[in-house]
Amino acid sequence: MNHRYYGQTVLVTGGAQGLGLAMARRFAAEGATVHVADRNTEALEEIETEITRGGGRVQSHRLDVGRSREIDAWVGAVVDREGRIDVLINNAGIIRDERIERIGDEAWDDVIAVNLTGAFYGIRAVLPHMKERGYGRIVSFSSMSWRGNFGQANYAAAKAGIVGLTRTAALEGARSGITANAIAPGLIETPMLASMNAAARTKLVGRVPLGHIGDPADIANAAVFLASREAGYITGVILDVDGGIGIGSSVR
Ligand SMILES: NC(=O)c1ccc[n+]([C@@H]2O[C@H](COP(=O)([O-])OP(=O)(O)OC[C@H]3O[C@@H](n4cnc5c(N)ncnc54)[C@H](O)[C@@H]3O)[C@@H](O)[C@H]2O)c1
């Protein structure tokens, strides 16, 4: 495996399962020291053991991305320990799908807090340090739903918020060697997708031009590229990794 991340420190939120776990494994395999944060303590312990046994460098932290004090403490501790943060991956996310009239205050607030505010807290926490070093890569998670999706008003609003946040972070970081981009996944095989209504899932898969659900490795491939030195002239981009579903109509 390519060791292009050797010596770099990579932060991944929501890294205990799904896409975050796939990215943590991949960054570690490419030589990075990976700091994984999640609220699922049990799964964190398992992945720390797994990656360490495989010869990778990983540290796990229990936190809730919706709490700024916890994010600030985590980022501060990583800077103290490693002396650098090269990459922040804002991946933690949740869904609470309902039609608008049925979305309660809590389902609205929780989805915005984790998917959008959590990414804002992460970016705000790492920026001073990245600016000081004159280098940084920020990759946040939007979704194909950012354009609007039936039954996902809270999630779509949060993921559209990621687009504005990312493009603004790109402008504010640009003079300091920092890029900010987002990945907008389509349907990717993870526990989140498994929790989706089965009928809706079948209908959606039928609309994927490439004809199949994506694998977490498809997302990890995009993330290790956008977070690399080589991607240094790419900023403010929302990269669809979705088998073409974001193109629109796919009637065959
Ligand atoms: N899987 C897909 O098809 C898909 C599609 C579009 C976008 N996404 C986005 O990709 C990202 C990863 O999705 P996934 O499918 O791997 O989801 P997942 O549910 O499988 O994993 C999400 C992880 O985030 C963690 N998490 C949730 N709330 C948290 C919080 N408050 N603090 C810390 N950690 C928290 C969970 O414990 C879990 O480990 C999310 O932002 C999601 O919205 C996924």
Image: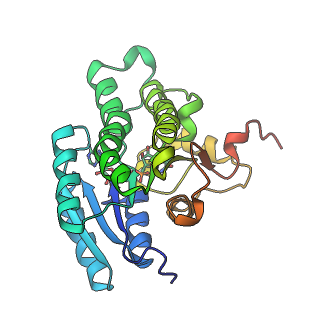
Residue 163 placement (x, y as % from top left): 52, 35
Q: Is 79 displayed left or right of 175 in the figure?
A: left
Residue plotted at (74% across, 49% down): 209
Count the marks: 0
Q: Picture coordinates of residue 200 (x, y %)? A: 55, 38
* Above or below for 166 versus 20: above
Residue at left offset 56%, top offset 60%: 222
Q: Could you say which is closer to the camera, residue 195 or residue 167?
A: 167
Q: Please tell me which residue is depicted at 24% across the width and 68% down the height of the picture.
A: 82
Query: What x and y, as percent, mark residue 40?
Result: 22, 55
Indicate the quadrant containing the C terminus: top left, top right, bottom left or bottom right: top right
Direction from residue 241 to residue 19 in the image, left or right: left
- In the displayed structure, 107 sits above or below 92; it is above
Front residue of 233 and 157: 233
Q: Quadrant of residue 108?
A: top left
Q: Position of residue 72 (x, y in %)?
A: 20, 45
Above or below: residue 132 compared with residue 60? above
Who is closer to the viewer here, 226 or 22? 226
Q: Is residue 131 left or right of residue 238?
A: left
